[in-house]
Every structure is written in structure tokens, then in C-alpha cells.
Image (cartoon, rainbow, N blue to C red):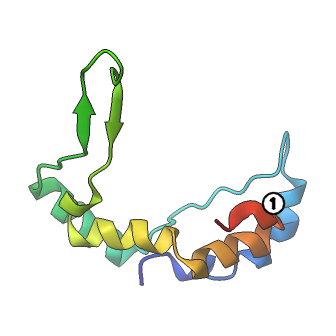
């Protein structure tokens, strides 16, 4: 499991989310499952990350792109899960924002 199981049903936090001030929000402490986080942390400590490609031409100055293909497998899993339909539905069930789906 990548995400802490207590966040598998974000709709359970709906009241807390909508009653938060000054705007609706939710703090997800220990968001990543502790065992997965420990594994990911050990891998990231040993890995020199290539975070992307930077561009330096006059038109492209200060622009960059992410090269997810060069990321460790465990980090790709986190990114893929957070972009998955399962997670997006979970967010929708919390926020009621229909535009959350691409």
C-alpha cells in the first residue's frame, strides 16, 4: 500500500474539510504508508535523482520538464497512484469538485 489506509476514504473527512478556515482544506499527516515511506526514503537516500531537463535558450529560459522515466520505481508508483482514477475519485468524494477529472 502506498497511501496510508486511513486516507482510503476521504469522504469520511468531508465535514472537517468544508469546516476548515479560512478555506476548505485537510491536513493529511502520515500521508504515505509508514512502511512504504521508509522503503522510499532509503532508496532516495542512495539515489542521485535526475529531476528533469532544463532549457537555456532565450525562448525557453527558466523552463524545465520532468523526466519521470528516470525516477526510481517506488517514486513512480507514488506519482502514478496520485494520478490514478481511484485517487481522483477519492478526492472528488471529499471535495465535490467535478473538474478534478481530466
Most extreme residue toward the top is: 58
Most extreme residue toward the front is: 59
| Residue occupying image coordinates x 59% and y 79% | 85
Choose between 58 and 37: the one closer to the eye: 58
x and y, in percent, of residue 86 in the image: 59, 82
| Residue occupying image coordinates x 65% and y 56% | 27
For this view, does 93 lie left or right of residue 73?
A: right
Choose between 93 and 11: the one closer to the eye: 93
x and y, in percent, of residue 49 in the image: 17, 49
Where disc 1 sits, the SS reads helix
* Quarter of the view holding residue 7: bottom right
* Residue 56 can be seen, yes or no: yes
State the quadrant of the C terminus: bottom right
x and y, in percent, of residue 6 in the image: 60, 79
Would you name the residue on which mark 1 appears? 17
| Residue occupying image coordinates x 84% and y 51% | 20
Count of numbered badges drawn on the protein? 1
Choose between 34 and 63: the one closer to the eye: 63
* Residue 38 can be seen, yes or no: no
* Quarter of the view holding residue 57: top left
Label 1 CA crowd tier, 10 Å (few <14, some 14–19, many 20+) = some
Choose between 83 and 37: the one closer to the eye: 83
For this view, does 97 lie left or right of residue 71?
A: right
For this view, does 17 lie left or right of residue 10?
A: right
| Residue occupying image coordinates x 12% and y 55% | 47
State the quadrant of the N terminus: bottom left
x and y, in percent, of residue 51 in the image: 25, 45
Amino acid at each position: 500500500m502506498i497511501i496510508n489506509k486511513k486516507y482510503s476514504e476521504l469522504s469520511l473527512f468531508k465535514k472537517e474539510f468544508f469546516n476548515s478556515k479560512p478555506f476548505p482544506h485537510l491536513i493529511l499527516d502520515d500521508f504515505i504508508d509508514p512502511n512504504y515511506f521508509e522503503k522510499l526514503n532509503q532508496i532516495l537516500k542512495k539515489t542521485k535523482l535526475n529531476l528533469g531537463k532544463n532549457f537555456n535558450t532565450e525562448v525557453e529560459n527558466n523552463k524545465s520538464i520532468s523526466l519521470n522515466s528516470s525516477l526510481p520505481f517506488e517514486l513512480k508508483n507514488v506519482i502514478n497512484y496520485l494520478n490514478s482514477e481511484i485517487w481522483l475519485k477519492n478526492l472528488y468524494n471529499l471535495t465535490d469538485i467535478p473538474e478534478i477529472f481530466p
